[in-house]
Amino acid sequence: MEKISNTALIEQISARFGDQAFEFSEPIGLLTFETNKETIIDVLTFLKTELGFNFLTDITGIHFPEAKLPIGVIYHLHNFRQNVRIRIKVFLEDEHPSIPTAFVLWKGADWMERETYDFYGVNFEGHPDLRRILNMDDMIAFPMRKEFPLEDPNRVDKKDFFFGR
Amino acid sequence: MNEPTITHALDRKETTTLNLGPTHPSTHGVFQNVLEMDGERIISGVSTIGYIHRAFEKIAEHRPYYQITPLTDRMNYCSSPINNMGWHMTVEKLLGVQTPKRVDYMRVIVMELARISDHLVCNGILGVDTGAYSGFLYLMEQREHIYEIYEEICGARLTTNIGRIGGFERDFNDIAFAKIKKFIKNYVPVLKEFEVLFTRSRIFMDRTVGVAAVDAQTALDYSWTGPILRACGVDYDVRANEPYSSYEDFDFDVPVGETGDVYDRYMVRNEEMYQSIRIIEQALEKIEKEPKGIFHADVPDIYLPPKEEVYNNMEALIYHFKIVMGEIDSPKTEVYHCVEGGNGELGFYLVNDGGRTPYRLHFRRPSFINYQMYAPMSSGMLLSDAIINLSSLNVIAGELDA
């Protein structure tokens, strides 16, 4: 099947969602855009059912402490028939970040979202079993946030800046 | 009459709670599943993972690119060269480095050897779990030969740290080539013998055919990739769909199964080993035609210079210092690169802000994503079938927890 071009995708997504889908870019050829948490499920449903992005490759998080909306949730989808990938980002506030779950569309989102919750504290609304997955249950911090130190904070010889960042 | 009376009817439990793992010999790794059993049948289960979580993603945010390679070793330690190469290629994609064809073919050889070592362990263990130890021992001897090849190429066996960003640390020597040639010649008969032991064995078929069958739609819904997805009949293979490292130059088949049961997964993995041998044969032929002695891209600002030059040449010394300190110029962008690992699509999502270390690095680990279906699919299964299912999913604890 003929590969759908990124420009055609941008057109179709913009036509459907207008200014709810923004910040289109193509870092190293992979179409990326942002949306907000109100429309994310509509966007994912549209991509899945109408544009053929049937496969959820990955869900993960990111933290930009300086930004206005610091916590990001990043989805990678894959269209198997036409072999195109797409990346969708949603940025949230960091006090109580919350976003609807993608579990309703893909069962595979279950553990990916639990992992994102575990490391960034993103509350996926409607997730059937949102618990920590890799860290211990009684941990209180969300360790992949930038303010969480890699090394023991009580050690003077183990400051993070000695180790690259 | 002396009739029995049931007291505390509500508290009475008809089922048994069974802890399968975390350290059970038949789970081949640190997995815990708390199963609710009705006799020998599983009613429901809850998987607990994270027993060997080592925070690789957090550590990676504090390490320059070349120091992340040893972290990737420790994910799928049955096929660490694939992880290493996947990581090198991610960084090369970020920095826009084009590797010479000979390097690509050398990488293909190493990756296919790793795939064979991954699949042979999986299929061998499957035999052990169904009660046949001998096949495992036949194949395990061959894994030893693969590790000897790694040893010749990079000096290590299990956690290989093989290659560098931009190529290899050194050229394959003649002994390495001789060992590869010897291996591909000797391996096919051993694999055939293994197949004679298993493929049409009545006992093996009774234990595996129809066990844990998954249809393609469910498998896609759960984001399965790799041999277990192909066993369901979906011909998705990253090597064929998005060729990396010059896989487009090779002629190979992507085997698929039909029913997605344990037997089909076994068959797919076996056939993939034959295809890997085919690819290695082609790669050896192609390397002959390439100019000799090229084992890395010509990128002095990324690839470490040889030590003699560092001591005698000003520029080499500067580059050496800058590379070791992680002071290489890198674009502020993000990249997703994936390779076909032993268990499926191994993805690296790298966000770079131009600093010494990745701003964010996420590993899409196929074992982690494949394993989430294990507990739901186990309900209704016999315990002994669930064990076989686990070993045919080939979940590697290191990749599961990262």
Image (cartoon, coloured by chain):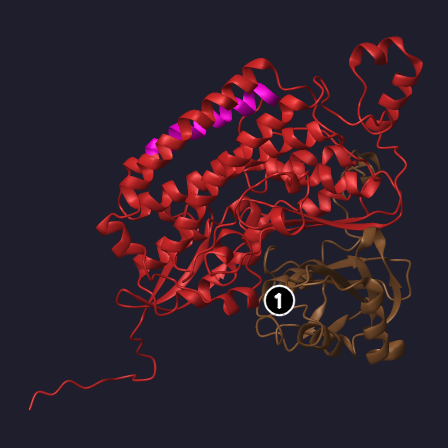
Q: Nearer the viewer, residue A105 or B198?
A: B198
Q: Position of residue B41 (x, y in %)?
A: 30, 67
Using residue B121 as the reference point, say whether residue A27 is left or right of it: right
Task: Look at 88% across and 8% down and name the residue there.
Answer: B312
Stretch in magenta: B137-153
The amino acid on which the numbered mark 1 sits, given as a three-letter code, is Ala
Q: Report if residue B184 is visible in the image.
A: yes
Task: Look at 32% across and 41% down and name the residue there.
Answer: B195
Q: Position of residue B288 (x, y in %)?
A: 63, 21
Q: Is residue B376 magenta?
A: no
What residue does disc 1 label? A109
Q: Report if residue A92 is visible in the image.
A: no
Q: Nearer the viewer, residue B363 or A56?
A: A56
Q: Nearer the viewer, residue B118 or B249?
A: B249
- Given the image, what chain letter belongs to the residue carrying mark 1? A
Using residue B356 as the reference point, say whether residue B149 is left or right of it: left
Q: Which chain is red?
A: B
Using residue A72 as the reference point, say whether residue B266 is left or right of it: left
Q: Is residue B146 magenta?
A: yes
Q: Is residue B238 above or below residue B104?
A: below
User: Seen from this angle, which residue lies furthest left?
Assistant: B1
Q: Which chain is brown?
A: A
Q: Position of residue B229 (x, y in %)?
A: 51, 58
Q: Position of residue B101 (x, y in %)?
A: 71, 31
Q: Is residue B364 above or below residue B317?
A: below
Callout 1 crowding tier (Cα within 10 Å): few <14, some 14–19, many ≥20:
many
